[in-house]
Image (spheres, rainbow, N blue to C red):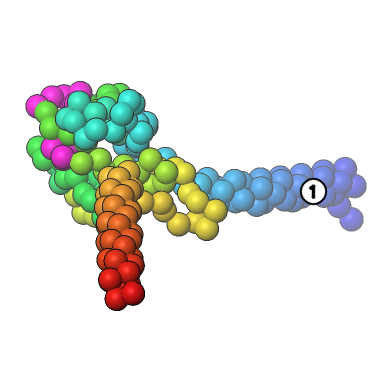
């Protein structure tokens, strides 16, 4: 027969090894969900839309000053310069601005104005003669030079989830309505004129 002490020590050693292996397996299993969660977590864009001034302050008179008070800002959240050449900025109706030969420095922000102006490191201009961002609702979408989605910003959806018209379109419709109102008033006067004419002829025949 073997030494009881030796046998007991062997059994204890085996138990310790088994316990260690089991503990290691538990650690591995516990680490899997965290790793999977980290992998599934969406990556924050390195370049993002950081602010939008879609309602130009003051009267919407379509002056260049008013157009340039409508703007959108893009921020580079990294410490490295990002080449935005070929990137696009688009509204919900498909109006697109394309960046040309522009590099956004690390931790820097550039403001893209709607109107006409001279581009600089901090300010870019779309050179438009009408407003682009909707007052009531719109979505600004930023894509890279390969058309890949980078970031977006939405505001002011209606109850039905549809976008309202842009301010420029609203003003056009209001002017169109006023035109039709004047046209209707003209026809009303024309009808009244015919009524008077008929009464005149009626009196003549009598």
Magenta residue span: 118-129
The structure residue drawn at horizontal position 27% and vertical position 24%, both measured from the top left corner, is: 108
Circle 1 sits on which residue?
15
> Could you tell whether 2 is left or right of 96 in the image?
right
**Residue 196 occupies quadrant:** bottom left
x then y, percent, for residue 177: 32, 53
x then y, percent, for residue 138: 38, 47
Quick one: 129 or 10, which is closer to the camera?
129
Q: Taking 170 as reference, is 205 above or below it?
A: below
The structure residue drawn at horizontal position 50% and vertical position 51%, both measured from the top left corner, is: 158
- Magenta stretch: dominant SS? loop
Q: Taking 172 as reference, is 104 above or below it?
A: above
Quick one: 203 or 171, which is closer to the camera?
203
Q: Is residue 197 magenta?
A: no
x then y, percent, for residue 159: 54, 53
- Image quadrant holding the N terminus, namely bottom right
């Amino acid at each position: 027969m073997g030494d009881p002490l030796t046998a007991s020590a062997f059994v204890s050693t085996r138990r310790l090894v088994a316990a260690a292996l089991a503990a290691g397996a538990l650690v591995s299993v516990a680490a899997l969900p965290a790793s999977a969660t980290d992998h599934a977590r969406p990556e924050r864009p390195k370049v993002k839309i950081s602010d939008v001034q879609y309602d130009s302050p003051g009267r919407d008179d379509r002056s260049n000053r008013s157009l340039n008070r409508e703007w959108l800002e893009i921020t580079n959240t990294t410490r490295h310069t990002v080449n935005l050449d070929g990137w696009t900025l688009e509204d919900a109706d498909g109006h697109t601005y394309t960046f040309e030969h522009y590099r956004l420095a690390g931790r820097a922000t550039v403001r893209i104005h709607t109107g006409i102006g001279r581009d600089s490191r901090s300010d870019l201009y779309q050179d438009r003669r009408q407003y682009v961002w909707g007052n009531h609702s719109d979505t600004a979408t930023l894509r890279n030079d390969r058309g890949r989605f980078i970031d977006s910003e939405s505001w002011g959806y209606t109850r039905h989830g549809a976008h309202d018209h842009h301010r420029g379109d609203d003003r056009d419709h209001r002017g169109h309505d006023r035109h039709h109102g004047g046209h209707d008033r003209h026809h009303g006067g024309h009808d009244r004129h015919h009524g008077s004419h008929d009464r005149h002829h009626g009196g003549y025949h009598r």
